[in-house]
Image (cartoon, helix red, strand yellow):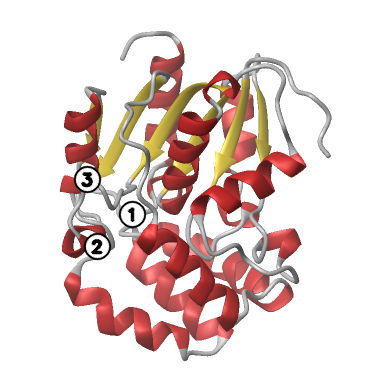
Amino acid sequence: MINEAPAKTWLLLRGLLREQGHWGDFPTRLQQRLPNTNVITLDIPGNGLKYREQSPESIPEMVDALRSQYAPTQPLNILALSMGGMIATDWMQRYPHEISKAVLINTSLKSINPFYHRLHPRNYLQLLSVLSKSQDKKEQAILKLTANNPLSRQKALNSWLDIARSRPVSKRNIVRQLIAASKFSPQKKIPTQSVLLLNSRHDRVVNASCSQDIAIAWGKPLITHPTAGHDIPLDDPEWLITILSRFINGDL
């Protein structure tokens, strides 16, 4: 159990098959730019430091697993990418007193977005092929799919390969996480927290309209990155940190 953190804590949550190591140096850079905050990262079972554990087959179970690691008594803020946005949504709805702000990046929700927007149809076969690849080839394929900036991909490749070799996600857990993400449908009530949606115009994993539709359904603001891929923290970390700073200061 992580010790209780101050109210200005930012919890960073990654998505499908990803772990805290995939943030790279982003948490450090965010901490440096926001010195009055406490930046923490956690892994769901099956990923990262918990790669030997079995992944839950539902998003609410993932939330409960994270809360067993850190159950805040003071409201925290969440920055969440992709499936992490689903986790953040469920957390906000079921434990609203624990969350103050949330920034959701390139996420999607079954109750709002059609399935063919939640995952680009052209990626169906590619995703299936990824499941059968070696750890190295799987990471190379995911990196190519989620990051648009060649320099970002080159910078991250060796680190991602090291993660895949030292903390591999089992095929069983890949399937379980896919099931959890595909079937998650949030409660109908709109989150009462301060929420900002971010999407990428050229996201090649999730259709950019997903974040737009969520923003409209919830009445929350949306900002679009003009060039980044699905993984904005990797493709353009400085842009994201600037947006977070403005959001914290109430400028968005």
Nearer to the camera, 219 or 5: 219
Please name the residue shown 44% across and 68% down the image.
179
* Residue 246, quarter of picture: top left
Which mark lies nearer to you, 3 or 2?
Answer: 3
Which residue is pictured at 42% across the width and 19% down the height?
Answer: 193
Q: Judge whether 229 appears above or below 245 on screen.
A: below
Q: Quadrant of the C terminus?
A: top left
Label 3 secondary element: loop
Tell me the crowding category of disc 3: few under 14, some 14 to 19, or many 20 or more residues within 10 angstroms, Cα based: some
Would you place residue 45 above or below residue 212 in this image? below
Disc 2 and disc 1: Cα gap in Å? Answer: 7 Å
Q: CA distance from mark 3 to mark 2?
A: 19 Å
Locate residue 164, reporting x and y percent.
63, 74
Whole-percent x and y of residue 78? 53, 31
**Which residue type does callout 3 highlight?**
Ile
Per the image, the residue denoted by label 1 is: 230
Q: Quadrant of residue 38?
A: top right
Residue type pointed to by label 2: Arg
